[in-house]
Image (cartoon, coloured by chain):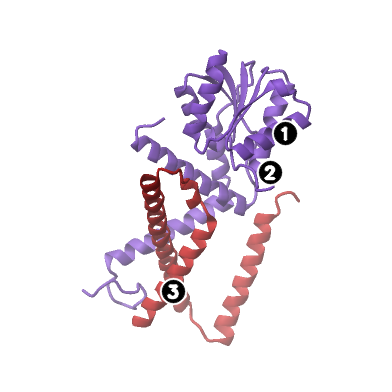
Chain colours: A purple, B red
Amino acid sequence: MGGFRPAVSGGRRAHPVEYGIRLLGVAGLALLFVGGFTPLANVINAWMGGAPRLEPAQAIIVVGRGGADADGVLTNRSLRRTLVGIQLYRDGLAPVLTFSGSDGEVNARADLARGLGVPAEGILTAGGASTTRDEGARLERLLRPRGIQRVLLVADPIDMPRTRRVLEHSGFTVLPAPTASSGPGNPELRLELLRDLGAELAAWAYNTLRGRP
Amino acid sequence: MENLSIPLLVLMVGLTSLAAFLVGTRRLGLTAGRLRRAGARTLDCVGLGLVFLLANLLIGAAAILGLRALTGAFVSLYFLNDATLAVLSGLQALVFQWWRAGRA
């Protein structure tokens, strides 16, 4: 038996590694077609977001996602979350709108919220965070001393389970307000969503291994 | 007209594949057996690409975690979530596959 050789040498028995790699290829192509050409990623995404509970709360929390560009312009995802948070505030569901994330992101969001008519005293910021866990700790320090416990959490469906777990671990009662989206309809964006789902799964596995929420 | 991308993709790729098949069989004298082998080689290449991708991700994650441990500074694992890595892994697989094929 020779070493690991190409699978396409006619007639000879293939090495088990060759079979393994070919099977992996089949799985990869299947994932490409199922992920890109069916709504699988959208279904998983919607399932992760869960059912919204848009009920009165003591604060609205809009967690970070994607940050802001160097010139202070929010990324698409960050902007969408911010607008949902502002809408919930305008609907009167909570007296306080809280932004967390990196400094650049929370400042850009607060500026936008003020520009759209949210009074400065209704806005709280928990900047300087670089991870979801860090955001949870900063939000706990900011909001719990103010007696805030029941919060509306604005996050993308894909981020909802982990963010919710982190905030509940910090003592908050969380009402999910996922950014409403049935998910993308074209293959490229569906595959991007699938990649994000993979990253989220990896983050969950990493945190579980380390015994973190 | 909202979700035209999937049928359009299928149409474009289907037509060019059919054209390539006709050119291959009628002009270049290629056989269906060779097409099967080409398909199998493509699967090998995709599989190898996934192996490279996994290896790249593992090395990247180890580098980031090592950097965190050594410097105490926070470096996000999200740096690994870059589509370019998949393209580069695919290229690695292609080169490796051609290299191996040259030995056969």
Label 3 sits on what residue type? Val
Side of A36 relative to A165 (left or right): right
Q: Are marks 3 and 1 in contact (CB under 8 Å)?
A: no
- The residue carrying pointer 1 sits among few (fewer than 14), some (14 to 19) or many (20 or more) residues within 10 Å by Cα, namely some
Q: Which residue is tagged 2?
A: A72
Q: Which residue is tagged 3?
A: B95
A54 or A25: nearer the viewer: A54
- Secondary structure of the residue carrying tag 3 is helix
A148 versus A63 height, above or below: above
Q: Name the quarter where the C terminus of chain A is drawn.
A: top left
Which of disc 2 and disc 1 is earlier in sequence? 2
Q: Chain of mark 2?
A: A
Label 2 sits on what residue type? Gly
Q: Residue at x 47, y 22 (%)?
A: A170
Eye-nearest disc, 2 or 3: 2
Distance (Cα) linking label 3 and label 1 = 50 Å
Q: Are marks 1 and 2 in contact (CB under 8 Å)?
A: yes
Distance (Cα) linking label 1 and label 2 = 10 Å
- The residue carrying pointer 2 sits among few (fewer than 14), some (14 to 19) or many (20 or more) residues within 10 Å by Cα, namely some
- Secondary structure of the residue carrying tag 1 is helix
Label 1 sits on what residue type? Asp
Q: Which mark is residue A111?
A: 1
B98 versus A59 height, above or below: below
Q: Quadrant of residue B57?
A: bottom left
Q: Is residue A107 visible?
A: yes
